[in-house]
Amino acid sequence: MATSTGHVSGARATGSSLRLSFLMFMADPQWLIPSMIAPVIFGLVSFELFRSAGPYFLTYAILGAGMMSMWGQTLYGSGWAIGQDREFGTLEPTIGAPAPYLYVVLGRVLWNVISGLIGGGIVYLVVVAAAGAPPAVPDPLGFVVLFVFVMLTLASVGIVFTAIWVYTRYAGFVQNIGEFAFYVGTGCMFPVVLLPFWTNPIALFFPPTWAVDALRYLAIPGYVGFGWGFWVDLAGAVATTLVYVGVAGTIFRRVERHVLEDGSLSWY
Amino acid sequence: MSDPPAIDVRGVTRVFDSRKGFLFREHTRTEALRGIDLRVESGSIFGLLGPNGAGKTTLVKILATLLLPTTGQALVLGHDVVEEQPWLRPRIGLVLGGERGLYNRINAKDNLRYFADLYGIPPAEREERIREVLERVDLENAADRRVEEYSRGMKQKLHIARGILHRPQILFLDEPTIGLDPKSARETRKLVRSLVSDGVTIFLTTHYMFEAEELCPELAIISKGRVVARDTVAGLRQLVGGDRTIEVEAYGFEDREIVSLRSLPGVSKIVTEEFGPRTRLTMRVRTGETLPGDVTDVLPGHPELAVRERRTALEDVYLDLVEEEAP
Ligand SMILES: Nc1ncnc2c1ncn2[C@@H]1O[C@H](COP(=O)(O)OP(=O)(O)O)[C@@H](O)[C@H]1O
Ligand SMILES: [Mg+2]
């Protein structure tokens, strides 16, 4: 009996991993409710706070604290999925399969981007319903495209974070401490320029900082931010994202080796 | 050129340095394998028998490229498990079994589709192949049910289905019947036997002596990270000096009597055990040289003397070996 394994395509592994994530979600879709409660409340609260601040208050409400949990989904959901794989005991057979593990992770991350967008859509609808009218956005199409891009920059950070999840069983612990700092530090919650100056250079290492700043330029007329304008922000976001994706490729090979050395693929 | 052995392990050791806890670290150092040498030819079922904690799973994971050895080298199908993972992974199958290791919330088919994709099974063949393995393990009627509804035995079958989905040349089965009810265990053993006829080499671990005896023409016994014996089932019986065992029970024996038993032809080893007022002597004997009647003749005047002869079970050999190994 000849082994009849064909060529293992990265795209196919990624697609299959995305499909698996979707099926796992569909098996238990009610998780969406608890993960939506916080964003919806944040969205509504900031809408009330910014109500009298001008015509773009609604955009602030949606882009601000309300998005926090949604972005969390993109950024950390993948790492969490790895933690689950370890708990289920499925990390071993997955890593033991010929497909490079990075492609599997990519599929998980893409699913999290998609589910993040679904969550974002729900927050949007709730806040709009509360406001009675859709937000005033100068360039709605550009906004949507850029919004998806912001999610992808978060996903690129997510892949690197995921490597840490694979690397160590204690990633969850580290992450719980780091999560809040990350939202503040990258300007996901409010513009980084409002933070003490020394935090700004650190924030620039993270792709979302640039992307979120660009998004604010697009959506909020009169926004100042770092002051170097939309296009520089966009270029910075693309460049840093590419660096993260490149780094992820390298890290993953090392991480895979490390876990085989360490014997930490399963709970022991 | 002759085929390389299916498995060739040379001086493999594995140490686990585990640190538990994040803030309050607790170090433990376990020598799971202390220098394993083992060669297994292809085309049969080879058994690795040993008690819990002997290092069976550790060795299987090393051979299946999921764990690196600390020192030593291991070749599977002639290829190094550390340096040649990409070559090996499509050619080996691993069944760790147990409750874990499957996506419980989705059905069997979707579990297999995912792994078929990760193994690069040609898309045009995927569905047919999945149908084929599910039929093979007798799960075709449960294919669309969520795995969480499966019994322990059905999960084990699905584990095996996943292990053979990509038609590996060598299949590692780690304690395939552990935790199964007797009926499922029997079915699983039957399935394992049937796989050999496909030409796949099977490396099976177990801590059940009877299972090794039933399934594996050749086996190695592992204890505390070392191989303490490696032979055919018949050879292992010889190893402890006799393929027959005679058990004698009475209310105590005199030393003189034991000495004369020992001098009977073909008797190699006598173990004494006390059960309350009764004493049992277990003797290893070579076929035909000493019969139960000869034993009775040496022990006159014992009321309620019981003499039984049986084939030396692999369990006897196993206990002899594992006990000798004890510190
Ligand atoms: N990942 C691990 N981390 C720390 N210790 C381990 C790990 N895996 C196995 N061990 C230890 O190594 C020894 C051998 O374990 P194992 O190979 O699972 O034995 P078996 O499968 O024969 O029961 C045991 O003492 C076990 O506690
Ligand atoms: Mg084990």
Image: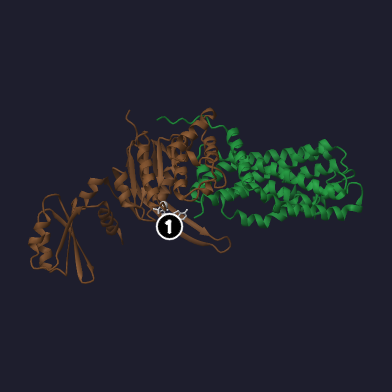
Chain colours: A green, B brown
**Quick check: A138 left or right of A150?**
right
Q: Position of residue B91 (x, y in %)?
A: 44, 35
Residue at the (47%, 60%) spot, across then down: B28
Residue found 23% across the figure and 46% down from its top:
B235
Q: Position of residue A230 (x, y in %)?
A: 83, 39
Looking at the rendered image, the quarter that the N terminus of chain B falls into is: top left
**Which residue reaches farthest bottom?**
B277
Establish if A262 lies above or below B132.
below
Subunit under mark 1:
B
Q: Is residue A238 left or right of residue A9?
A: right
* Residue A188 seen in render: no
Q: Position of residue B120 (x, y in %)?
A: 52, 33
Q: Position of residue B109 (x, y in %)?
A: 53, 39
Dot 1 surroundings within 10 Å: few (below 14), some, or many (20 or more)?
few
Q: Amino acid at mark 1?
A: Thr
Closer-to-camera residue (A2/A22): A22
Q: Is mark 1 within 8 Å of ligand 1?
A: yes
Looking at the image, residue A93 sits to the left or right of residue B174; the answer is right
Q: How many marks?
A: 1
Q: Secondary structure at mark 1?
A: strand
The residue positioned 24% from the left and 52% from the top of the image is B313
Residue closer to the observer: B38 or B323: B323
Residue on which disc 1 sits: B30
Residue that sits furthest to the front in the current view? B141
From the image, which quarter does the C terminus of chain B lie in? Answer: bottom left
